Image (cartoon, rainbow, N blue to C red):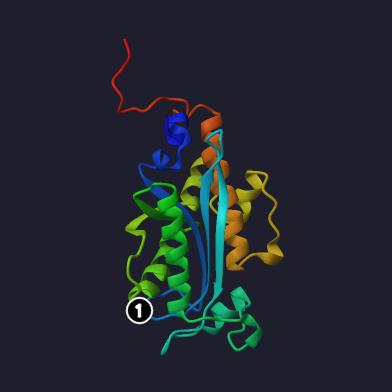
C-alpha cells in the first residue's frame, strides 16, 4: 500500500483545494498600477498538511527588487512602505531573478504535493496577483505555475469569518500576534497572512464545516 493510500483523502493537500496548491504572496510596490509602477519587494510561503490534515506554513522565499527600467516611482508609496530604493543594504535583485526564484520554489513544492496548479493566496489578492503576473510578463519567465486569474483572498475570507477585512484586525480576531511596526514588510505580512489563512481553514475543519474525515468522494458508495 502506498503512503498516499494510507492517508485519509482530505488529509492530502492535493485534495483539499481541488488540485490547487495554495501559495501565500505579499508584494510591496511603488504605486498601484502593476503595468507602470515598480515592484519593490516580494515574499511567498508555501503550505503543507500535517498528519491530522491541518494546514501549516512550509517553505518561504523573499526578494528585494530593483525597479524595472522606466518604472514609475510614487514617493507617497515609498513613504507608506518605508522602502529606500537607493539603500545598497537592500540587496535588491532584478525582477527576472525574483520571479525565476519564486516560480522555481513553487513548482518544486507543487510537484511534491502532487497538485495540478498553484493558486495565489493574499490579502486583497487582486493587487498582489496583478503585480506578480505583470512582472512575469515583463521578464518573460516561462512555466508560470499560478492560475492566471483565480485566487484566494484572505480579506474576503476574514470578512466572512470574523467581520474584519483589515489584516491586523483579522489577525487580532484570530488571536494571531501582529506587530504594527513590522507591517508593510512583504515577508512579515506574508507570514501573518499565512497564519491567518491556515487558522481559518483549520478552524472550519475543527467546526465540522468541511468533510475532512470523509473517504474519497469519487469512490463507490458502500452498502
Q: Which residue is mark 1?
A: 138
Percent x, y of residue 195: 60, 49
User: Which residue ends up furthest to the top in the rendered image?
Assistant: 223
Vertically, is 94 above or below 50? Answer: below
Q: Is residue 145 left or right of residue 167?
A: left
Quarter in which the N terminus is drawn: top left
Asked whether residue 99 appears in the rendered view, the answer is yes
Residue at the image position 61 percent from the left and 55 percent from the top: 192
Percent x, y of residue 86: 60, 89
Residue at the image position 56 percent from the left and 57 percent from the top: 59
**Which one is in front, 186 or 63?**
63
Q: Secondary structure under badge 1? A: helix
Percent x, y of residue 116: 34, 49
Vertically, is 2 above or below 143? Answer: above
Percent x, y of residue 61: 55, 65
Vertically, is 113 above or below 212? Answer: below
Asked whether residue 152 appears in the rendered view, the answer is no
Amino acid at each position: 500500500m502506498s503512503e498516499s493510500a494510507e492517508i485519509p483523502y482530505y488529509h492530502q493537500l492535493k485534495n483539499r483545494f481541488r488540485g490547487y496548491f495554495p501559495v501565500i504572496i505579499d508584494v510591496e510596490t511603488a504605486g498601484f498600477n502593476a503595468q507602470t509602477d515598480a515592484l519593490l519587494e516580494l515574499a511567498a510561503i508555501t503550505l503543507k498538511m500535517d498528519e491530522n490534515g491541518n494546514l501549516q506554513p512550509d517553505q518561504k522565499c523573499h526578494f528585494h527588487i530593483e525597479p524595472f527600467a522606466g518604472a514609475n516611482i510614487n514617493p507617497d508609496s515609498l513613504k507608506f512602505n518605508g522602502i529606500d530604493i537607493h539603500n545598497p543594504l537592500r540587496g535588491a535583485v532584478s525582477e527576472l531573478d525574483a520571479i525565476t526564484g519564486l516560480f522555481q520554489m513553487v513548482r518544486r513544492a507543487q510537484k511534491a504535493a502532487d497538485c495540478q496548479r498553484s493558486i495565489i493566496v493574499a490579502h486583497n489578492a487582486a493587487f498582489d496577483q496583478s503585480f506578480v503576473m505583470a512582472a512575469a510578463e515583463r521578464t518573460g519567465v516561462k512555466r508560470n505555475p499560478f492560475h492566471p486569474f483565480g485566487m484566494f483572498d484572505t480579506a474576503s475570507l476574514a470578512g466572512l469569518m470574523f467581520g474584519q477585512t483589515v489584516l491586523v484586525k483579522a489577525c487580532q480576531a484570530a488571536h494571531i500576534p501582529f506587530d504594527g511596526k513590522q507591517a508593510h514588510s512583504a515577508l512579515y505580512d506574508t507570514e501573518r497572512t499565512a497564519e491567518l489563512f491556515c487558522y481559518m481553514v483549520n478552524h472550519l475543519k475543527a467546526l465540522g464545516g468541511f468533510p475532512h474525515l470523509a473517504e474519497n468522494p469519487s469512490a463507490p458508495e458502500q452498502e
